[in-house]
Amino acid sequence: MANNNKINYRATYPRNLKPSLLALAISSCLAMPALAQETTSSDDEAVKLERIEVTARRTVENLQTVPVAVTSLGEEQLAQRGIDNITSVQQYSPNTTLQVSRGTNSTLTAYIRGIGQQDPLWGFEPGVGIYIDDVYLARPQGTALDVYDVERVEVLRGPQGTLYGRNTIGGAVKYVTKELSGDTQFAVRGTLGSYKQNDLKVSGQTGLTDTVFVGAALAMYNRDGFGRFLNTGDHNYNKDLMSGRVSLQWNAADNFKVRLAADKTVDESNPRGGFRLFPSVRAPNDVRPTKVYDANISMPVENKVETEGQSLTLSWDVNDNWTVKSITARREGVTDTNIDFDSTSVPTLDIPAFYEDKQTSQELQFLYNSDRLKVASGIYYYSGEACGAFGQVVYGLSTTENGGCVDTESRAFYSQGSYRLDDKWSVTLGGRYTKDDKDANVYRYVYSGYKFPRRPGGTRIGVQTDFADSASFSHFSPRLGVEYQHSNDMMLYGSYTNGFKSGGFDMRANQAVNPDANKPYTEETVDTYELGMKSEWLNQRLRLNAAVFMSKYDDMQVTVQRSVELSPGNITVASQVLNAANADINGAELEATFAATREFNLSLIVGYVDAKFNEVEFFDPTQQRVVDVSNLWSFANTPKVTATLAGTYSVALSSGELVFTGNLAHRGKTQIFEIPSLLDYGSYTLFNAGVTWYSNDGHWDLSLQGKNLGNKEARIAGYNFAGAALDNSVLGFYIDPRTFSFSVGYRF
């Protein structure tokens, strides 16, 4: 049976320490660290922040010894702070954007340090890698993961190209599920909340024999919409999602483990309708929304996203130094959705869409660990097929159906090692060679009438695009680092890292507007120089981790869409994927945690980014030539400042323990697209708070959570089709309003 002792969420700090003395101690420590180390009292030696383990370098290590900017949130931190979706993690990781994409509920837009990808279309590569237990998720659909059966979530900032490979040019997010121990465990949690929220999570594991363990988890999330589609009465911004995971582990020998895992998620939430910033001329009879969560719609209110995957992990500890690991995985996803780009009851611009993707990957890792040398090497293979089709229905009179597939084969070889020269100095050297082969076919046909993809109907009256092509992309990503262990409590490091995002084909290519749209766009690269510090002060009561970085971003891939009138009354949407060159990104990050008293912990997370384009080559269809628009563009989804102040306060009761949590999360002014638009939004600050009670026996907990308590309204995404041609359709999508939830949990 599992250990049922109540978890102690409070550190053991002396109660008689005055706040004024704490302030003086911090000041003295920062000014004279050597003196502070010498004068620490013997009582304070018991006051220590918990050790945090991460797998940023493919092996389990202490966060404070890893020369990488990384944030790690464990299971209890996630629960106490009311983090039930991976998007909320952005509040606790500096210079990080994790949010739901526009008209969807479970598609993720991810940016780290100014680098990411906001276009979820098949064929486009992400800039931030998302992983579940070391398995790379190639497509953003379904990656706005709900948090359940999780051990921790890690955010790795900066290029991770050497160990994690292609498309981690901005960083990586790792979702690490719970290990199987063989103990019999069971947990259930029910949640009720605002907008008729009704969630249920159930998980458990047991040992079938002394060497065979099995575990399973199921989560169901249901909530009414924050608003409605006014002309149909359907919910807008609702949630209807079910997710499950099963795993089996066989300890075939003391040094050999086999783990089989499978997961599936079905999201049947309604498509999201955006709020019109301007009234419609074409739909004068529509009820004008008064809330940003209300909209109108001219399409069926239907949406379904299914994702699933299976993985097989073999781990062999050859001896005390060597471990060999094999990770075999396959995943697939299907999305069938309707997106109303004008949010009216008339079909000014309707987008019925269908996406389908499959991927298979195989990774073989060779891990070496000795007193002076740590090496992670491996071979990686990926094969994926991403297909889809969507219609651009203009005025309900004609449909431009855009579709196709891109097949990708990727092979990589990598190795990274850290060698300790002496007790103070160590060096890190690594590299990864990647080769991608892509085959693409793209079509763009014009039909009369209203046509849904994959369904018969309409008469084809024109061809704007029809081509098939292939391209190969290869790249070597090096990493070089130097680490200095100043003391047991402070490490300084400097590193140079290169990352890249693979090139490809524009799956929206419109050769009627741009004859060269069939040509592939090239890979983008970044060279990042970083200086960092991992430190603990006041005898490990204060943890200060900081980094400054400078990145040179070349051939940045940017998707630009605009409405174009080919001839009077002949309106289409043109797309370009641009390689915008010579962008500079500089910034700094601070993560601090301080145990103020036995009961009170404080955390401060601050990020600053200064990102600018130096040159952007843009084909202007109105001028029919390439122009430089770098003076007009800015980085999307990249606020200059992100900051969070969070606190945890514990109170002992005769019946158990209360843990109070609260945080202020600030995000600076954000530009939605690279091109300035009316959608761009100013800065905002959210206040979240919660309280959790734990029973003495560790079986029960009750939790009350409040989010966005100030009921702030902030626009984070949108569609921008300004102008009379498409009815001035400028739509905004917004953060969640103020919500409350109450949970009851039981475990044994």
Image (cartoon, helix red, strand yellow):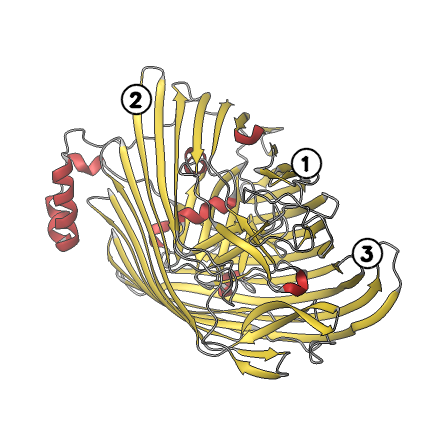
In the picture provided, is 70 more to the left or to the right than 378?
Answer: left
Q: Is residue 465 above or below residue 112?
A: below
Outermost residue toward the top?
A: 654
Q: Earlier in the sequence, mark 1 or mark 3?
A: 1
Residue 285, compared with residue 189, is above or below; it is below
Front residue of 540/125: it is 125
Q: Viewer-proximal residue, 514 or 245? A: 514
Q: Report whether residue 225 is seen.
A: yes
Quickly name the residue at label 2.
652
Residue designated by label 3: 450
SS at badge 2? strand
Total numbered labels placed on residues in the image: 3
- Picture coordinates of residue 54 (x, y %)? 43, 49
The part of the image, by quadrant, that contains residue 479 is bottom left
Q: Amino acid at mark 1?
A: Gly
Judge depth for marks 2 and 1 and give the one in front: 1
Give 107 or 460, whichever is nearer the viewer: 460
Q: Is residue 246 visible?
A: no
Question: Where 261 falls versus 399 (above or below)?
Answer: above
Which amino acid type corresponds to the residue marked 2 in the rendered image? Ala
Q: Is residue 18 left or right of 348 when viewed as pictured? A: left
Q: CA distance from mark 1 to mark 3?
A: 23 Å
Distance Cα–Cα, label 2 vs label 1: 48 Å
